[in-house]
Image: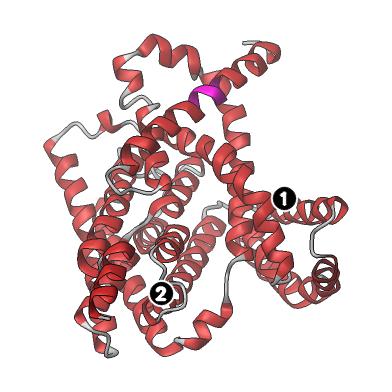
Amino acid sequence: MSAFDLSVLFFLQMAFILGVCRIVGILLKRLGQSQVVSEMIAGVVMGPSLMGWMFPGLSTYLFPVDAKSILFAVAQLGLVLYMFLIGVEFDVGLIKSRLRSAASVSLAGIVAPFALGATLAYFLVGDTTLFAARTTTLQAVLFVGAAMSITAFPMLARIIFEQGLSKTSLGTLALAAGSMDDAAAWCVLAVVLASFQNNPAIAVYAIGGGVLFGLLVLLGLRRLLLPLGRRVEAAGEMSQGMLIFVLMLVMLGAWFTDFIQIYAVFGAFIMGIAMPRGKFSAELHRIIYPLTTAFLLPVFFVYSGLNTRIGLVNTPYLWLLTGLVLLAATVGKGVACYAAARWHGESHREAMAVGTLMNARGLMELIILNIGLQRGIIEPALFAIMVMMAITTTLMATPIFERVYGSKASRAAKEEAFL
């Protein structure tokens, strides 16, 4: 297709993507599921696993191979902006307030699923239907371990906010543990991506460049941006010129970490952490968040869905492996975090709630899996298995949490009855 034809098709694609995501979102909201879960499922629905199987002609017309590059670019932009906002909302104070308990829960939520995932990868790395032939045992072990260890921190934060638990002991513990958990998993992934080169010097260059970038941004740029924060506080809003400057910094950060062969989202996340807090961060969230989550992020879910071919999981062996992956992910994350929370004196109810929230993987898992697929670490069959695990653990989060801890409405009713 010509560039003109692709540009014309793009607008139809966007209308279709937004429409399907909205319809699935409305249906699943009645079942108590969040918009993130709805978009994950909508992405798979629009991919070869369902639409490509039931309506192959429509699927080929709407999502031809030539159009994938455009969708990829839009998806990357959405991811970069979203991870920037996650960095903007990253609260170091939460970690300080519950350091011991959060560190324990986070460590348990990393070590147990990492060990189980690494063990599975160790025995499966020779299977070229799951891992690329050039993937080494160490790379496979680290990648699957990191993918198993990740937590859906944005979804965790959303559930806690929606349930009115942001300032509670449970909310603080879960957010602190989730943020530490994800930071560690992303560090492991950065090492894997940097090491996935034939030239050791490139890996050193990538890791060294990433560390240097982080230090310069967090220790240098962060201080230089403080006057901008004071200007926004005084004005009460962010000017267009300042917004453009911030977005330029985000794009430069994403470009640099991509250039040194780590990944663009790392640079965006670090830039987000460096932003001034208070009114400055609130304005960034107000301006960027709606367009990013409503318009750009659905494209990423569709791009992931186009790469997810559940039909590749077509043998008893692969379905057994899917079950093992789900079991390892759930036991390794949920049970381990529950045990760690109980060890630190949390009640059975709160420990169960923490374990349930930490077990959700959501968008963060899809980001890691797409990186692995794009970089040629894993093959489409393992990608499909891991996507199914991500969707299932994320689907479980809200219903189990509300069953264990109660919904906001039910807790309010109990408190009113008690009074």
What residue lies at 27% left-to-right and 68% top-to-bottom? Answer: 413
Q: Going by the picture, which residue comes out furthest to the left?
A: 316
Q: Position of residue 275 (x, y in %)?
A: 72, 67
SS at mark 1 in the image: helix
Magenta segment's dominant SS is helix
Considering only vertical position in the picture, is 330 above or below 49? below
Say what amino acid the circle numbered 2 marks: Gly
- Residue nearer the viewer, 209 or 84: 84
Q: Which of marks 1 and 2 is nearer the N terminus?
A: 2
- Tag of residue 47: none
Q: What stretch is highlighted in magenta?
A: 13-17
Check disc 1: other Cα within 10 Å, few if <14, some if 14-19, many if 20+: some
Read off the residue under disc 2. Answer: 171
Quarter assignment of residue 120 = bottom left
User: In this rendering, would 381 be left or right of 135?
Assistant: left
Considering only vertical position in the picture, is 186 above or below 378? below
- Residue nearer the viewer, 231 or 46: 231
Quarter assignment of residue 239 = bottom right
Measured in 3D between alpha carbons, the distance from the residue under mark 1 to the one under mark 2, in whole angstroms, is 34 Å
Q: Where is residue 193 in the image (x, y as percent from the top left)?
A: 53, 55
User: In this rendering, would 279 be left or right of 227?
Assistant: left
- Tag of residue 255: 1
Considering only vertical position in the picture, is 136 above or below 71? below
Check disc 2: other Cα within 10 Å, few if <14, some if 14-19, many if 20+: many
Say what amino acid the circle numbered 1 marks: Trp
What residue lies at 71% left-to-right and 74% top-to-bottom? Answer: 218
Q: Is residue 68 visible?
A: yes
User: In this rendering, would 200 be left or right of 384?
Assistant: right
| Residue 14 magenta-highlighted | yes
SS at mark 2 in the image: helix
Q: Position of residue 397 (x, y in %)?
A: 29, 58
